Image (cartoon, rainbow, N blue to C red):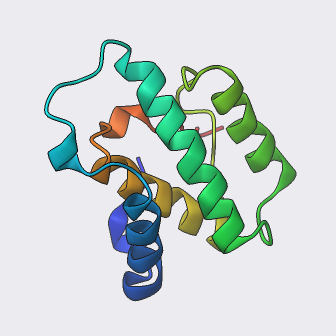
Amino acid sequence: MIMTHFLRPVGLVALASLICATGPGLAQRSAAPEDWPAVKCERYTKAYADALTKLGRKGLSQPFLDAHEAFLASGCSIKGEVCPRSKEELDLANVMVIMGMNQGMASTFMPFACRRS
């Protein structure tokens, strides 16, 4: 799990807030939809695209991008295969974790983990 104390407080939190503002608010979601995993993946996919548009791809390695694309292509079912290593990758991962929490997704939904070799 990505630790939020690594966040650059103002910039990343502001960006995560902007991304979250594009989706429905928690007050609008009183009950979980019938296919909640698919809804979470749809929201996450949109937020990821928005974050890439706002942050850009500079500093994101091809293995990071490929692993993340595999997560999305799996319907967001592959867990713990995206390892953020650079500052930019960690920043993006932190934005996505904040967005996910604000959208009602559990931390276990996130694809981020780095395995020890």
- Point out residue 6 in the picture as x, y percentages from the top left corner: 42, 72
Q: Work out which residue is located at the far top of the displayed protein and give it.
A: 34
Q: Residue at x 33, y 48 (%)?
A: 24
- Point out residue 19 in the picture as x, y percentages from the top left corner: 47, 63
Q: Is residue 31 above or below residue 101?
A: above
Q: Nearer the viewer, residue 14 or 83?
A: 14
Question: Is residue 74 among the parts visible in the rendering?
Answer: yes
Q: Nearer the viewer, residue 73 or 91?
A: 73
In the rendered structure, the answer to whether residue 72 lies left or right of residue 76 reads right
Q: Residue at x 40, y 55 (%)?
A: 99
- Point out residue 84 in the picture as x, y percentages from the top left corner: 62, 55
Question: Is residue 84 among the parts visible in the rendering?
Answer: no
> Which corner quadrant of the image does residue 8 belong to?
bottom left
Q: Is residue 26 above or below residue 90?
A: above
Q: Is residue 26 above or below residue 106?
A: below
Q: How many marks?
A: 0
> Which corner quadrant of the image does residue 2 belong to?
bottom left
Q: Nearer the viewer, residue 72 or 26?
A: 26
Q: Work out which residue is located at the far right of the displayed protein and give it.
A: 62
Q: Nearer the viewer, residue 116 or 98?
A: 98
Q: Residue at x 38, y 63 (%)?
A: 21
Q: Work out which residue is located at the far bottom of the displayed protein and give it.
A: 10
- Point out residue 113 in the picture as x, y percentages from the top left corner: 53, 42
Q: Work out which residue is located at the far front of the displayed protein and give it.
A: 28
Q: Is residue 106 above or below residue 77?
A: below
In the rendered structure, the answer to whether residue 112 lies left or right of residue 68 reads left
Q: Residue at x 51, y 31 (%)?
A: 41
Quarter of the rendering occupied by the C terminus:
top right
